[in-house]
Amino acid sequence: MHKEFLMGNEAIALGSIAAGVKLVAGYPGTPSTEVLETVAKRNPGDIYVEWSVNEKAAMEVAAGAAYSGARAMVTMKQVGLNVASDPLMSLEYVGVKGGMVVMVADDPGPISSQTEQDTRTFAMFSKVPLFDPVSVAEAYEMIQEAFDFSEKYHTPVFFRCTTRVDHGYEAIEVKDEAEYRKVEMEGFVKDSSRWVIFPRLSLKNHGQIEKRNRELTAVLSAYPRNAMHREKGRYEGGSGGKGIVTHGISYMYALDSMEKEHHVRILKVATPFPFPEELALRFLEGLEEVLCIEELDPVLERALLEICGRHHLQVRIRGKLTGDIAAAGENTMLSVGRAIRFFLGLEEEQPAEPADIPLPVRPPVLCAGCPHRASFYAVKQAMKGKKTIYCGDIGCYTLGNAMPLDMCDTCLCMGAGINIAQGVGHLDKGMKCFAFVGDSTFFAAGLTGVVNAFYNQADMTLIVLDNSTTAMTGHQPHPGTGRTVMGQVVEKVSIEKVLRAIGVATVETVNPLDFAEARDTVKRVSEEPGVKAVIFRSPCIAVTKPAASSAVHAETCIGCKKCIREIGCPALVLREGKAYIDPSLCTGCTLCEQICPTGAIGGGKKNEE
């Protein structure tokens, strides 16, 4: 054993390696991304790692490994679970042979997501057991236990963290390579009665799953991480008829909010599904009131309400459903402390919702020199005066919605923009319909939409924003980059060839930083009937280096503010009535140079090698 200062996601990765994982597949999504990246970086040499084309593919790849008796892990964020849910729902009915952990990072806030969905609720829906760590150290240990549990009960299991555990840091003890678990892989054994899902098999296995999960309520009541804790010598068994039930990072907030004189019984729930009912019954003995502190859904609260009803217990359960805990948003030390003090009668006023200190609003913007800004501006200028809809997607380019670009009219989920544009266009024939999608998202979720558009004869323009990386989540490779996470150099999957193979006849590729050509290309292509595509190809500024920044010649600048008013680049500001470019931000993309009416800006040059 040795000590390392680790991010939560790094700890999960190292715990998985120590558990003997042999295959890790996933799709990048904050706050989960670093798990797979750390496995790839710290790979002892016997683990296959891949960024899959999307979460569904990752789930199915991991299932294949688990069918073979190997330990496998699949990683994603909470919205990625929606994409992976189809195979997962059937996989629970079929089961696995090797341990399989589905690591899902939830994002209360949400900080970097479309939704605040709670994987604990999904666990109940899918009947898949779930592990929920409270800290970086516990995540390291618990992921190893999750693999053992999965293998013992032949079921995939969820490992659900939230942002504050995923991105928290702690100095923890980790195993040396000699201590890693060695798991023998039997290999895939043909057995259609086990691995081929038919209605008869599903019916039989459904009954067995329900029976198993009922039995697990007792098994998990004895799981040491589900416990009434006496942490740091601060708590007695509880008095005054009050108790607190909590989980995850909220448990740590609750501990840090308690004072020595607060003799409150605390139940830490590490496995919210199946719920540790026997332990909960012991916890509830002699209590009159219980406060459930949790993120995001009232999972613990509902479980306790059900137990109290089934066992006729006269205990008042409080939490989100009673308004004692905010119904939405992330818990904080401040909100949890206020809720506890109000619950204990130490504060007369119920905590406000949300109970957080307001912070200055800093809306995200496209980076200075981002080629997406040039792409959006070219489309906007090409379509000036025409009735249009711009359907956006998930990625950096969602920020095209910000003023002054204002080029994202809709955004739902990955790949949805392509189909939404079709839906609008089929009913509004006078609308010029555009769908924007990034290169990584095109492979992850855009292909079926393009096939649908071509097959159903939609009239729309597809704009592929190809910046040669998965920029939003940290520049991971994808099928169009020509390399894998394991460092292999492979042949790039051509977006142009894929589109033409589908049947799209007009596919043009242009550099968005050549404004006139980009604008004219959009004008010409958008007038053609049916499905047509423009690929704007220019690498992300994070993967290229600027050669020279642009500068404003003050004597020529007339202070018209067109450069500032129309493209919204953060490197452009007004100084003493003239435009000024911050050289520390400018990447030399030259877009501002091309639109300046007086030619007052020059000198920019971007190195795209």
Image (cartoon, grey):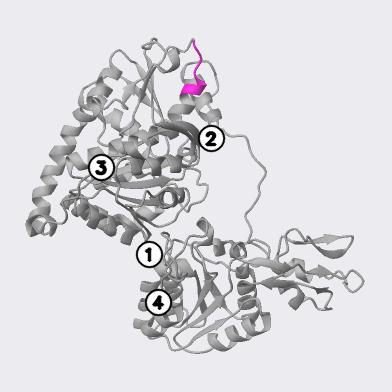
Name the amino acid, label 3: Lys
Q: Residue at left 45%, top 77%?
A: 495
Residue with the mark numbered 4: 450
| Residue 250, image x, y percentages | 45, 31
Residue with the mark numbered 3: 182
| Magenta range | 255-260
Q: Work out whether mark 4 precedes mark 3 in sequence or the reverse, and give the earlier one.
A: 3
130 left or right of 405 in image: left
Q: Nearer the viewer, mark 1 or mark 4?
A: 1
Name the amino acid, label 4: Val
499 left or right of 536 in image: left
Q: Work out whether mark 3 precedes mark 1 in sequence or the reverse, and give the earlier one.
A: 1
Tag 1–tag 4 contact (CB < 8 Å): no
Tell which residue pokes out farthest to the right in this image.
Answer: 555
The CA span between labels 2 and 4 is: 43 Å
The CA span between labels 2 and 3 is: 49 Å
Residue with the mark numbered 1: 53
Residue with the mark numbered 2: 353
Q: Work out whether mark 2 precedes mark 3 in sequence or the reverse, and give the earlier one.
A: 3
Image quadrant containing the N terminus: top left
Tag 2–tag 4 contact (CB < 8 Å): no
| Residue 501, image x, y percentages | 37, 84
Name the amino acid, label 1: Val
Residue 169 at least partly seen: yes
